[in-house]
Amino acid sequence: MRLKEEENELRKMGGGNAQKSAAARERNNKDKGKTDAERKEASAKAAKDATALVCKICRATFMVNVKPPTLHLHVTAKHAGTNPVECFNILAGYDPEDPKGLKKAAAATSSAGPVKQKKKKDDGFEDLLSVGLTKGKKKK
């Protein structure tokens, strides 16, 4: 009688659900956070990104995601009269009159030549549409 009770107890324990164990292990590992190596790597990447662009004249640092208009503003404010490329190589070809490059893109497409337009084919869809609209109304 005692053996049967122990057998039933073992069956209730569920003998080895690998998915549940793996999920619990993963959940517990997430709570621990980053390892020391991961923290050092993230810190090094952040430091590298923070000093991605350096002014060659005054050594001011700029983040990696800074836009050329901001860099040009730095050059005009701090180093008036100097060539912007002397401060930042990225400003080569930058036009302060066209900060987003829209004029340059428009000039490139217009110099490519005229764009051929396809002739419109009239399939008479307007007639079909008008017939379909009047057909749907019911008289009282």
Image (cartoon, rainbow, N blue to C red):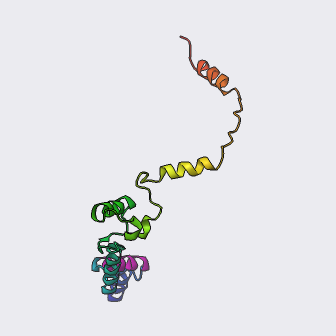
Between 120 and 15, the one lying in front of the other is 120
Name the residue furthest front: 81
Residue 138: which quarter of the image? Answer: top right
Q: Return the x and y of residue 11 as percentages of the image width and height.
A: 39, 81
Q: Return the x and y of residue 42 as percentages of the image width and height.
A: 33, 78
Residue at left 32%, top 80%? 29
Between 43 and 66, the one lying in front of the other is 66
What span is in magenta?
18-30
Q: Return the x and y of residue 5 as percentages of the image width and height.
A: 33, 84
Residue 26: which quarter of the image? Answer: bottom left
Q: Main secondary structure of the magenta part?
A: helix
Between 19 and 41, the one lying in front of the other is 41
Q: Return the x and y of residue 28 as percentages of the image width and height.
A: 31, 79
Residue 11, relative to residue 90: is it above or below? below
Residue 72, relative to residue 49: is it above or below? above
Name the residue furthest top: 140
Quadrant housing the N terminus: bottom left
Name the residue furthest bottom: 3
Between 42 and 2, the one lying in front of the other is 42
Residue at left 69%, top 42%? 116
Residue at left 40%, top 79%? 22
Residue 12 in view in this figure: no
Residue 120, relative to residue 28: is it above or below? above
Horizontally, is 80 left or right of 68 in the view? left
Horizontally, is 102 left or right of 135 in the view? left
Horizontally, is 62 left or right of 122 in the view? left
Magenta stretch: residue 26 in it? yes
Magenta stretch: residue 64 in it? no
